[in-house]
Amino acid sequence: MKRYLIPFVLLGVLAAGCRQPAAPVGIITEPTSASTNTPGREYPKINPDLSVEFQVQAPEAQEVAVDICSKVYPMQREGDGPWTVTTEPLEPGFHYYFLVVDGMRLSDPSSQLFFGCGVDASAIEIPEAGVDFYLDKDVPRGEVRMQRYWSPSMSAWRTCYVYVPAEYEQNPSKRYPVLYLQHGGGEDETGWMRQGHADIIMDNLLAAKKATPMLIVCDYGQAGDFAQILLNETIPMIDATYRTVPDAKHRAMAGLSFGGGQSWSIGLKHPEVFSSIGVFSSGMFGGVGPGAYAPFSVESQLPELLASPDAFNQVHDVFYMSCGEGDPRIDYTRAAAEALQAAGAKVHFTAWPGAHEWQPWRKSLYEFCQLIFK
């Protein structure tokens, strides 16, 4: 499950017998094939202004379009040539997209597939100028292990993915804290490693000595009674299989969107299991989408905080909340964080540039991992 992004560092052309300096990371100086393309595919291409040119071979089609996060770009065709379109400049980060061919939504054969939106979806990675914390570097690399385990409650085999740091095998007597990291709705246990590059983020943090070496466990959170599975099956299995420190002080739980709600409802409610909690872009604080949660209330959701702020803070080492500034959840999340702080909770809140998308979630993980297990 290791994913390798080629950093967007473009070499300058030869001029007057000398090589010009390389462009800064994340800066595109000429149309460049996306790193998320399948091998050998030229398109989609990212332009210097971060617009994207798509080309699709569909000779029998009557209408073709590109749907990027529900924004549709109709494509045009000249004669018997390919269908083409150039989008407006896109926000940096990772975006799912689909082709719409004669009304049917399809994946793009020119793109790698990523499980998102409840299906195997195409996607495009738009670089962000000066941002490289989730890009491969020449640093020691950890491993992402596919861990299968039997779930008695579901009478089925389950699969989770476990990141172990590069030093794990070189320190056979050392035990490690564990971060349980949950995906969003419509995604699965592969999301944080493939789309989010959690393993690369942690490798880079450890190489820079900005984080404590830890395991990261990504499990599928939308099947069965996940709270029961996590607490009674997944965690005991991880503690029995890997060299962990099996206590609350050395466990954290975090997640994005739907997984952020799980981190709140499971992690925050079980301080005897988890000491640090991260809630990224959760819609549970009110007002988003059909069946939206009622506005957040400390009195109804965390009465134990009101009863004893000191006791609450004592058992929660890190209580982290974040959201994208362009996410419709931002106002509700900020209001909830402020209400918690007013009630005495030590909440670390960060608003990142971006909407409900992977770039704020990657940045949230990058920051959260620097705070926990200190």
Image (cartoon, rainbow, N blue to C red):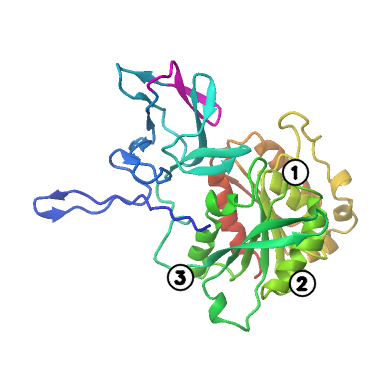
Q: Position of residue 23 (x, y in %)?
A: 29, 50
Using the rendered view, name the quadrant where residue 74 is placed: top left
Q: Distance between the residues labelled 3 and 2?
A: 28 Å
Q: What element carries label 2?
A: loop
N-terminal label among 3 and 1 = 3
Q: How far apart are marks 2 and 1 (CA)?
A: 29 Å
Disc 1: which residue: 336
Q: In this view, does 94 lie above or below 240?
A: above
Using the rendered view, name the quadrant where residue 285 is placed: top right
Disc 2: which residue: 247
- Residue furthest toward the bottom? 173
Q: How many numbered marks, from 0 up?
A: 3
Residue type pointed to by label 2:
Asp
Q: Can residue 341 be seen in this view?
A: no
Residue type pointed to by label 1:
Ala
Comparing 167 with 342, the one in front is: 167
Q: Does the magenta stretch include residue 32?
A: no
N-terminal label among 2 and 1 = 2
Q: What's the residue at 52%, 54% (across, down)?
A: 197
Comparing 44 with 46, the one in front is: 44
Question: Which stretch appears magenta?
Answer: 59-74
Q: Position of residue 60 (x, y in %)?
A: 40, 19
Q: Where is residue 106 in the image (x, y as percent from the top left)?
A: 52, 30
Q: Is mark 3 on a helix, strand or loop?
A: loop
Instruction: Name the side, left or right, on which 306 lies relative to 101.
Output: right
Q: Do the residues labelled 3 and 2 touch (CB within 8 Å)?
A: no
Disc 3: which residue: 140
Residue type pointed to by label 3:
Pro
